[in-house]
Amino acid sequence: MEKEILYGTAYYPEYLPCERTRKDLKMMKQAGMNVVRIAESTWSTLEPAEGVFDFSYIDRVLAAARDEQMCVIIGTPTYAVPSWLVKKDPEVMVETEEGRSHYGHRQLINLLNPSFRFYAERVIRRLAEHTAGNPQVIGFQVDNETKHYGNMGDEMQQAFLEYLKEKYQTTENFNTAFGLAYWSNSIHSWEDFPDLRGCINGGLMTEFEAFCQRTAAQYLAWQAEIIGEYKREDQFITHNLDFQWKKFGADIAQDGYSYGVQPQICHYEAARALTLAGTDIYHPTQDALTGAEIAFGGDEIRCLKDQNYLVLECQAQGFKYWTPYPGQLRLHAYSHLASGAEGVLYWNWHSIHCGYETYWKGILSHDLQPNPAYEEICRVGREWKTLGKKLKGLRKENKIALAVDNRSLTALQWFPIDRDLSYNDVVRWMYDSLYEMNLECDIVDAAALDPEKYRMIVTPALYCASEELLGRLEAFVKKGGVLVSSFKSFVADPQVRVHADTQPHILHSVFGMSYNQFTDPGTASIKGQPVQYFAELLKCEEAESLADYEHPYWGAYAGITRCQKEKGHAYYVGCFTSREILKEVYEKAAKDAGILRMGPELEFPVIVRSGVTQEGKKLHYLLHYSQEKREISCPFACVRDLLDGKVYEKGSRISLSDWDVKILEEEERHD
C-alpha cells in the first residue's frame, strides 16, 4: 500500500442489524477502497465482562480484509468505557465543575484514575497482542478525539499542585507569577492551595488549562508507548485530532462543523507521540461549502510533524445539512489531497440503526444499498486507482505562516475580546481571507514557529507570547520578513500578566506605533465599511496609517498601520474589519514579501492549492466551490490536466463546471 493513497472508511459490524462483513468489504473494494478502521468504539464488545475477551468480530473483519486484499487500522477502544468498569469504580467517570459525570456518553473519563488506567492498559495490550502480527494491519489509532474532558477532580488538581511546587519552588514566587495578592488570593503555605473550581485568576486558570491539555497529550503518549511494544516496524501510530466545533445556531450536538483550534488539547504536544498525524474534519456543505475547513484542518495537521497526514474521518452524508450535491464528495476528496493528505477515510460506512448517532448518516443509508454518495465515492476510487501514484506524497512549500496558540485561546476565554468574537473567530477571519486570495499558508503552533522558513508571518490575537518569541519576530522583520498582526496581539506574558509598558510589548518599535486605549467601535468605520466588536486606537510614530477611523472622536487614530523596519515590514490591524479590507492589507504585505498572486480571476470560489509531487513535478489543484459555471485564464506556462489529459498554455481558457476539479501538472513547453 506504500504507493497507493489510503482510501476507506470507519466500519462497525457490531452496530449492524445483521452479519454482512464480507458483503460490505466487497462493496468497499468495488468502490476502490483499500483500508478500513475498526475497534475504537467498542470496549464493551471486546471485553463484555471483566477479564473476558472476545475478538471474534475483529477476526471476521481481518479475514475478509485478507480475502479482499484490504488493509486495517486498529483503534484502541478506550474513549468509551464499559458499564462494568464504572460499577467497579464510579470514580472512573470524570469530575467537572458540575460534579461527577454519569455513565452513558463517551469521553467522560478521568484519564488519571488508577482503575481506568489499569483496565485500559490491559485491553490495549490484549488487542495489540492479538492484531499486531496480522499482515493486514498497517497501523494503530490510539484512543479517539482525546481531550481532558473538563477534569477538575482530586487527581488532576493534586497533580497540578505538584507541578506548581516544582516550577515555582516557593509560594512567594507562585504568588508573584500570577499576581495573587488580588482579592486576597495569595497563599503562604502549599497546604493552603484552594480548590480551583472557585478560582477567579485568569492567569492561574490558563496555566491549569495548559496543564490539563498536557495531561491529555501525555495520556496519548502512554498509549502509544504500550502499542510500541507490540507493533511491527512498518506499522504506524496515529490519532484523530479534531477541532473546536462551531454551532450553526440551535445548541444541539448534531448541528455544526469543525471550526478552529481545539481548546481541550494542544495538537502540537499531542502529535509528539504519533508517527503519523491524523485528523477528523467536518464542514458545511450544499450551498455553504467553501473548502475553508478542509484547508484549515489540513494546513494545521500537516505542520505538526512537518509531514503529510491521514484524514481518519470526514463526511459522506451526515446530518440533513450535509447531504452533498452531486460532485461535492469528489471535490471534498481532492481538496484533502491538495492540502497534503496521504489518505481519506469516511465516517462511516453505514448509517446506524439505533443509538445516539442514528441520523448521522454514513456512506450507505439505512437500507444499506448503493446510493448517489456511494456511486460518487466509487468514481473517486476509480480515479485514484489510476492516478494514486502521481498524487500521493504532495510536498507543500508555503512561504506564509499563521501562528496559533492554545494559551492565548484560553486567556481570551477569560478576558473576551467581545461576547460575540472569540479567539477562533479571529483566527478564521485571518486564515479564511488568505485562503480566499489563494495565499497558501502553514498553520504553526507559536511554540514551534521557525521564522527562518517563511517570508511572511500572520499572528491572529497572539495575546500571550514569550520574550523569546517576540525577540525572534523582531529579528524576522529587521532581516527582511513581513509580519501581519491583529489586535490583542503581544498583550501579556505566558502567565497572562498584562505588560506594564508600551503596547504592543517589545514590538511597538517594529510596528512604529503604540496604543493605550481601545473601545467598542460603535459607529466607527474604515474606508466606508463598519468596524465591528473591538478597536484599538493606534498612534502612529514611524508607521504610516493605511486607514484612519471614520468617527467624530476616534478619527484622530489609525486603525491599520504599516511600518518599514530595516529590511522588513510590519503591518498591524487594530480592529475587526471586513474581509475585503483585510485582503487589501494582505495584498500589500504579500507584495512586500515578494509573494506573487495569480490574478483576480483566481480568487474564491476558484481555489488553487499547489505542491511538488514525489517525481519532482509542480502540481496545481483547481478546486471550484460554486454551482455556477465559469472560465478562467490559465496562469501557468504549460500544464496538463491529469484527469482528462487536456493541455493548457498561459492565457488559454479553462472551463470549470459546478463543483469541479482540475489537477494541473506543469510540463515543459515544446514550441
Image (cartoon, rainbow, N blue to C red):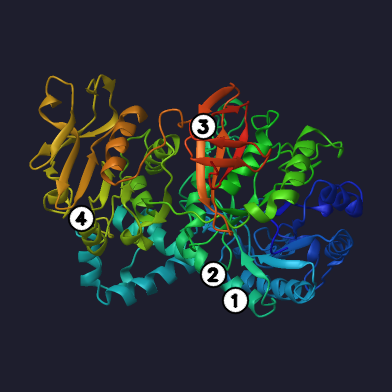
Asked if marks 1 and 2 touch (Cβ < 8 Å), the reply is: yes
- Circle 4 sits on which residue? 182
Disc 3, SS: strand
- As drawn, the label of residue 273 is 2
Of pointers 1 and 2, the one earlier in the residue sequence: 1
Of pointers 3 and 4, the one earlier in the residue sequence: 4
Of pointers 3 and 1, the one earlier in the residue sequence: 1
Disc 2, SS: helix
Q: Is residue 210 toward the left or the right of residue 94 in the image? A: left
Query: Is residue 293 in view from this perspective?
Result: yes
- Residue 43 is situated, as x and y percent measured from the top left of the image, at 74, 62
Disc 4, SS: helix
- As drawn, the label of residue 606 is 3
- Residue 408 is situated, as x and y percent measured from the top left of the image, at 34, 52
Q: Residues within 10 Å of mark 2 (few under 14, many from 20)?
A: many
Asked if marks 3 and 2 touch (Cβ < 8 Å), the reply is: no
Q: Nearer the viewer, mark 4 or mark 2?
A: 2
Which is more toward the observer, 365 or 192?
A: 365
Vertically, is 664 above or below 602?
below
Asked if marks 3 and 4 touch (Cβ < 8 Å), the reply is: no
Q: Is residue 441 toward the left or the right of residue 174 in the image? A: right
- Amino acid carrying label 4: it is Tyr
- Amino acid carrying label 3: it is Val
Q: Residues within 10 Å of mark 4 (few under 14, many from 20)?
A: few
- Circle 1 sits on which residue? 225
Residue at 85% in and 37% down: 370
Locate the N terminus and report the quarter of the image it occupies. Answer: bottom right
